[in-house]
Image (cartoon, grey):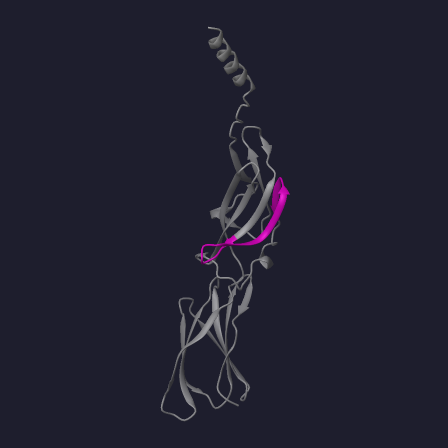
Amino acid sequence: MKKALALIFIGIALYSCKTEEPTVASYQLQVDNELVNDTIDHKVSYKFEVINKLTSTEETGTWEVQLLKQDSSYFTILKEENSQEFKIQSGSLIEKIPTDQLFQYDGLRIKGRILFYNENRQVSLEKVFTVWGKPAKPIFHILSTEENGYTDEMDVIFGFVCNGATSIRIRHQNNDYGYIDNIFLNMETHTEVYNGLDISTVNMFSVHASNFLGTTISDPIYIGED
């Protein structure tokens, strides 16, 4: 009997010393200005914060603005640590979005996310968005070359990709003759044919991709001889 009472006493003592597990909080990522169609508008400023819904307090953590790449990894363009809120001022992202990365697009806008995390509390939240950037640097290359039966002439087919652009053009400059051609193309065009290109002189080709934020230019391609 005494042994049983002792065991009961020990059990009560252990129970009384047991630390209660904290209630798992519910967190919400909020923004003061609506992202219409989940799109960050460069003309609008935003403030993001994470609220603990149980305590109605702001959480502190690390914030990142990340863009989604074609290989499904993320490219961080902004990061702020140990902060209760995160601000994006109007127009501040335009120059931070690189044009030399291969991002995933939703139409003509880049996919991304606002990420908040606090590793100590094991909190991780995100808000997906799309955002306009300057057009990606055009991918420009020669698909084929073919002699056309005439001396010093060649038929050339170019291929190119212009992500994020609303207008594109190929610029052809002949260095010997001094002329420049600008060929404006339909946005659905991904190849262009040049028949009878004079290869006895140097020809420089480049693709210019534009939208309302600016223009980016491909690396040049040179065809012909001095």
Residue at the location (52% across, 73% down)? 219
Q: Is residue 58 magenta?
A: no
The residue shown at (57%, 48%) is 64
In depth, the one of 65 and 13 nearer the eye is 13
Q: Answer above or below: position of 134 versus 26.
A: below
Residue located 48% across and 86% down the image = 224
- Residue 134 image point, x, y percent: 54, 62
Q: Position of residue 65 (x, y in %)?
A: 55, 50
Residue 145: x and y in percent read 39, 82
* Residue farthest bottom in this picture: 151
Asked if the magenta segment contains residue 80, the reply would be: yes
Q: Which residues are magenta?
A: 67-88
* Residue 194 horizontal side relative to residue 10, left or right: left
Which residue lies most toward the left here? 149
Q: Position of residue 179 (x, y in %)?
A: 53, 84
Q: Residue at x 52, y 11 (%)?
A: 9
| Residue, far right | 82
Above or below, 207 relative to 36: below
Given residues 84 and 87, the one toward you in this image is 84
- Please give the count of numbered marks on the rendered protein: 0
Q: Is residue 192 above or below residue 69?
A: below
Q: Main secondary structure of the magenta part?
A: strand
Identify which residue, 11 or 25, lies in the foreground: 11
